[in-house]
Image: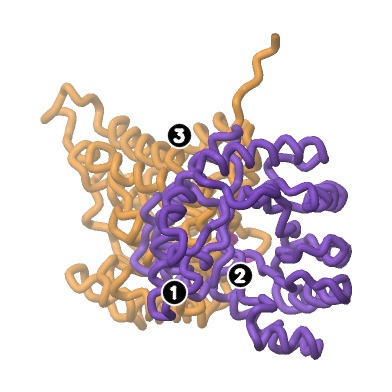
Amino acid sequence: MAMTLPKESFAGRVYSLTIGQPPKKVIFGGENVLPFHSFEGSSPRKPVIAFEIQDVVPDDWPEEIQKPYSEVMGDPALWARFCCETLGAEALALRLAGTHPDRGDRSPADAAETVRSVLSAADVPWIILGSNHAEKDAAVLVAAAEAARGRNCLIGKAQESNYKTIAAAALAHDHKLVAMSELDINLSKQLNILITQMGFDKEKIVIDPMCSALGYGLEYTYSVMERIRLAALAQNDPTMQQPMLGDVGMYVWKVKETQAQEEDVPQWGGLKERAVAWEAVTALALLVAGAELLIMRHPDAVRAVRNAIEELTS
Amino acid sequence: MLIIGEKLSIIAKRVREAMTSKDKAPIQEIAVSQWKAGAGMIDANIGPAEDNGEEMMRWMVTTIQEAVPLPVCLDTTNYRAVEAGLSVHRNEWGRPLINSTSNDPDRFPMLELAARYNAQIIALTVGKGGLPADAEERAAIAAEIMARAMEYGVPLEDLYLDPLVLQIATSQDHALKVVKAIKMFQELNDPPMKTVVGLSNISNGCPRHVRPLLNNHYLALLMYEGLTAAIADPHEVSNTVKTIDVIMGNTLYAHSYLEM
């Protein structure tokens, strides 16, 4: 007798979300199956990877991740073009790290200027992020959202303490919104409810359940993502059906495995290979947990994850 | 859990007057109010409706569905009125539910209607010979009705078994027997049989201020045993439904879960 594969089907479906402007828009989400289970239902889109750039020279990045960008990272517009033209980026993420009070405290007006300059340098879809300083982000992202008007960007991150201002700015200037909570599925749902109650369309939100690097709590992010996705599909919970973001590079490129020299820890092997693998493995784990959008840094790690996506979807 | 809004009943004076004078406004206002409060279906109880039952049910179904995108529960003993309601029911928001058949042969034609119109149907687990004594007798009657339904071509997943909630004030010992029956009904088939109760009957005849207490707490017990649907007032019970769904793990908790 022929063997029939058991198939699981779900009542719920993840919202499909578009950022950017034609012809270079990207669409992600839209599936009614668990990640890469396209044989059980429909999974119309592949995950999207955005390269991360910053508004100021990222002098806190370890040496290995500065290398690929050493020629361009002094100029965000140049850096953006490099990612698109040389690395083939399908989307970009601008992190306004220089607006953090401890990292230069650039003003919202300065941030808006950077936004205008990078957006005119590259016509790909953009993610625009603050510096994760809740109070400062509220001011910075209002200015950034206005400067990016008309480009259908993904703005963030809105958190419990600042979501009202940031969601209002995204609403006013017609952007999508990242809603971030700290590794807690119930708080994630709660934040989505609060944002939706402001009149913000629930289908324009991307969930960031807070990322973590391999070896540094990745299993917590993995578990929360997995449970969010099951709530979306199995419980058909409309407050949990948003696509999810893995903000990978920021968490990976501060752990010691991406920095320690081979001379100091010979048993860990070569630094570059190890660091790239650390980012790629973290990213792939989050895709398997349910992320549809990744923000990454190293070109080789991005290539490795793209190859894995191709293998899993072909 | 499905709440079937109970407020459009001929027993209520305002509804009865609107039905008599064919005044759509109060009917639609009540339907919308129940829908917004969480009803997934609206019960249209026109009573025995021996005169002009067909016209009345047609008017009720049309009037309700002009105002809310929900299916209607056709609540009358008048076979022709049920058929008239089924013939105008719009199915795009869900299939209609006939209320009801039972193990009384006089009520079997309702099964025939359910089969013919691809409708769902409530089966009261009573026969011609009076009320069932306990949960076991309710389950035995349920099994007979299930066999009858299959005979008429009604799929078992379209059958909602109703153990008949009795008044706590007069039949206190039946309260837990009904809870037990809800559990037993589900074991009669795989996948489990669907179940429904007319919830507020538990507090019928009780003082006004204790009725919501009795209704809500009783519903919690029934939901714990797996109740599929309740004919009830959504304004009164929706917080209980949401809360028990959270406690049972059917919905994900969030601080604002009551507002969803």
Q: Are marks 2 and 3 in contact (CB under 8 Å)?
A: no
> What's under tag 2, amino acid-wise?
Gly
Location of residue A37 in the rendering, given as x and y in whole percent from the top left corner: 57, 35
Q: Which residue is mark 1?
A: B206
Helix, strand or loop status at disc 3? helix
Q: Which quadrant holds residue A56?
A: bottom left
Q: Position of residue A84 (x, y in %)?
A: 52, 53
Which mark is on residue A173? none
Q: Colour of chain B?
A: purple
Mark 3–mark 1 contact, CB under 8 Å? no
Q: What count of labels does the image hold? A: 3
Is residue B105 found left or right of A212 in the rendered image? right
The nearer-to-camera label among 3 and 1 is: 1
What color is chain A drawn in?
A: orange
Q: CA distance from mark 2 to mark 3?
A: 56 Å
Q: Quadrant of residue B187?
A: top right
Task: Identify residue for label 2.
Answer: B5
Q: Chain of mark 3?
A: A
Q: Please name whichever residue, A278 or A120, is drawn nearer the observer in this view of the structure.
A: A278
Q: Which residues are magenta?
A: A17-21
Instruction: Work out whether residue B126 or residue A107 is closer to the camera in this orientation and state it.
Output: B126
- Pointer 2 chain: B
What colour-coding does the image apply? by chain
The 10 Å Cα crowd at callout 1, few under 14, some 14 to 19, many 20 or more, is some
